[in-house]
Amino acid sequence: PIALYDGTETYLLRHPSPPPEFAPMPGQPGVLVTPGRHPAVVGNSTRQIGGVRTATVIATPGQSIESAMLACVEEVFHVFWLDRHTSFRPNELARYAYPVKDVRNLRRLLAEGEALARALEAPTLSQAAGWAAAAFQIRRERLGLLSEDDRAFETGLEMMEGTANYVARMAVGGATESTVTRLRTAWHPDQIRWRFYDTGAAICLLLDRLQPDWKAGVERDLESTTARLLEAAVVRRRVQ
């Protein structure tokens, strides 16, 4: 289910037991509506509405349709993910201790992002695997600089937010191009969490090329990570 506030009313769709404040919208079968912003809709997230985890989205009149669509797909996917995948939850408090001013880590983050961007742009599978291997080599060096909490924070973001961003971008279109652009975006160090949304999405897109059945693997082994799957796919192509 999803609840969307458009600046005037809140719309509720696909909810199995809608609360009484929502009424059917005339001429729109399956759509329920309530005046104003429902108290549970405080941002793009997931909240309990009527005892059911529900995607919540605020889509203001000035927002582009594409941006609103990305938010809707991403948050609906989070409802699925939070129910199915319980192992990877980024500790949001960890970002306050993350070494955002560590030049050694930031330099390698930029290099890793560029390698992933080049892997996505590569015209052949061999070249894509080669650039992915380069990204993982840089990552191994970089992770040695981080604490266990920092590494878990990155993994949690890539697994929960990266996969959701991948799904949303695939639904809207232009997933590879938009991900490459964002990987090369000069994020401020304090916005470090967004970088792992994009590396996580990039890993999923590369898995589509190098291991097309990867989604079934993630569903079979709920402890596996997309990064681990991609690294294994690169090794199978004998890229060192």
Image: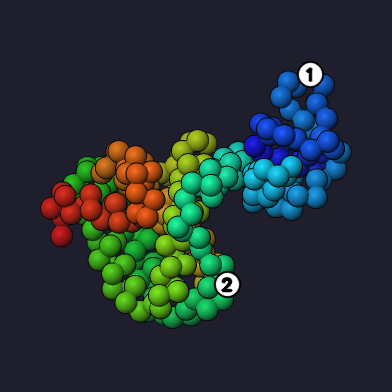
- Identity of the residue drawn at 45% across and 57% down: 87
Q: Which residue is mark 2?
A: 93
Identified by mark 2, the residue type is Leu
Type of the residue with mark 1: Gly
Q: Residue furthest top?
A: 27
**Element under disc 2:** helix
Q: How many marks?
A: 2
Report the front residue among 158 and 223.
223
Identify the image quadrant of the C terminus.
bottom left
What label does residue 210 carry, if any? none
Q: Which mark is residue 27?
A: 1
What residue is drawn where x is 44% and y is 42%? 175
Q: Is residue 31 above or below residue 204?
A: above
Q: Secondary structure at mark 1?
A: loop
Residue found 29% across the figure and 51% down from its top:
229
**Residue 27 as seen in the image, left or right of residue 120:** right
Question: Looking at the image, can residue 131 be seen?
Answer: no
| Residue 56 image position (x, y, % from top left) | 68, 45
Picture coordinates of residue 235 (x, y %)?
Answer: 18, 54
In percent of width and height, residue 103 lies at 41, 80
Is tag 2's residue or tag 1's residue first in the polypeptide sequence?
1
Relative horizontal placement of residue 197, taking residue 5 as reference (left or right) = left
Q: Nearer the viewer, residue 118 or 151?
A: 151
